[in-house]
Amino acid sequence: MKAIICGATQIGYSIAAYLAAKENDIIVIDESAERIAYVQETLDVQAIQGCGAHPDLLESLGAASADLLIAVMQSDEQNIISCQIADSLFKIPKKIAHIRNQSYLNSVWIKKPEYKIPIDYIISPEQQVARVILSNLQVPGTMEVVSLTNSHTVVISIHMNAHCPMNNIPLQQIGEQFPQMPFRALTIIRHDHFIIPQAKDYLQANDMVYILIEKVKLQKFLSVFAINSEPIQRLVVAGGGNVGFYLAQGIQQSMPNVDLKIIESNKDRAQLLAQSLESAVVLHGSAVDINVLKEANVAQSDMFVAITNDDATNILSSLLAKNFGCLRVSTLVSNIMYPKFLPSLGIDSILNPSFVTISKVLNHVRRGLIQSVHVLQGGSGEIFEATVAHGSEVIGSPISVLEHDKQSMVAGLIRDHVFSMPHSADIIEEGDQLILVLASKFIPKIEAMFRT
């Protein structure tokens, strides 16, 4: 795949780094010489200084042969124009744009095809991150809730603590002991290693584990693993920027009984939030000010969510909240190195906005009948759903054809609207919907097998 990424911002850089690692032909354009130099030094891509909305530059880079254009420049208008030029002049099949301004996001004309704005997908990281956090809040006790397109299953990630009764017990034995709640451990992140576990493997303290389970069995699973999933009643949010505002709106709509407090350091922004959010208490002050945290009563809160624009503030305020006695803390961090050690400090849930955005982009980039893609924290692998189309090379083959050297696994199968956890010898049929987990290096090979 040939992709042109207009903008070497944090989002653009993260997308380029991920796609470049998957043997794609990537071109990155940015007006900043400093950002382009950094791309050239750190990524195996073609990096060009210039404006991604300029037709002559796009033409010189062979835009007519590109499969994809991703516009993530700092101007919404430049991103829209870049997509228009990509479509009108170069007929690039797929265009993705980062849009920030609410006037655009709330407008019907930019989303409906009849208005002929040639953007196939809009990236709004703030809205997407807020939705993910809201999903996580609705299943307390988990680190992350992964939304799948099928209505039968859910994927959660959990951090194994030292007191979990399921530690050091083979997965097969757990399954035999609790046959009424079949689950599949998709992957274990242990000491930075990506592991697709086998039946004889076991979980241990400090593992981060992704679990596939039927939605109706989720509460039973959480109970067996001694994970406290009591609904949240008192919530404190540090950060009233766009993510915080979208999250607060979502909480008021879907969790109206939650007692919500928001801490915001900017006085004008705090006043705006107070006027816009009727049922929330907005406190003006720093999230790392002990007096402000006391005023927010974090000690009696069920959850503290730190989503300011500063990683250090998010981490420190989360640790302070946990030290005060808050039951659970969730932290937004942009530096991909932080999630590796934060659970050991007592932070219960970590979210990296780059991986949220990459996952959303990949849902519109993956070829073949792939319905949803989720990039695992750290970028070590992916979970995705794929449908076996007519003419696919895997029809009539056993499930094992998609499982390689403990680096890929078919964890779930939906056939005729019935969900099951397949065995390696089961035969793949046309129309099957499969749920897979893959190590990064196997993604291009498995993806190719779902093309027709």
Image (cartoon, rainbow, N blue to C red):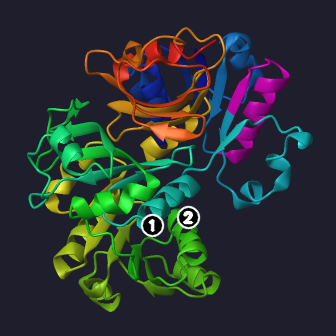
How many residues crowd around disc 2 within 10 Å: few (fewer than 14), some, or many (20 or more)?
A: some
Residue under label 2, please give it: 242
Mark 2 to mark 1: distance in Å? 20 Å
* Image quadrant occupied by the N terminus: top right
| 170 left or right of 188 in image | left
Res 142 seen here: no
Residue 388's label in the rendered image is none
| 122 left or right of 25 in image | right
Q: Position of residue 114 (x, y in %)?
A: 91, 41
Q: How many marks?
A: 2
Q: Quadrant of residue 440?
A: top left
Stretch of the chain drawn in magenta:
75-95
| 450 left or right of 317 in image | right
Q: Position of residue 212 (x, y in %)?
A: 37, 44
The three-letter amino acid code for the residue at tag 1 is Gln
Instruction: Tell me the element at label 2.
Output: helix
Q: Residue at x 48, y 56 (%)?
A: 132
Residue under label 1, please give it: 138
Q: Quadrant of residue 380?
A: top left
* Image quadrant occupied by the C terminus: top right
How many residues crowd around disc 1 within 10 Å: few (fewer than 14), some, or many (20 or more)?
A: some
| Residue 258 colored in magenta in the image | no
Q: Residue at x 49, y 72 (%)?
A: 240
The residue nearer to you, when weighing 266 against 132, is: 132
Q: Residue at x 32, y 52 (%)?
A: 180
The three-letter amino acid code for the residue at tag 2 is Asn
The residue nearer to you, when weighing 169 against 439, is: 169
| Residue 78 colored in magenta in the image | yes
The residue nearer to you, when weighing 52 against 349, is: 349
The residue nearer to you, when weighing 275 against 225, is: 225
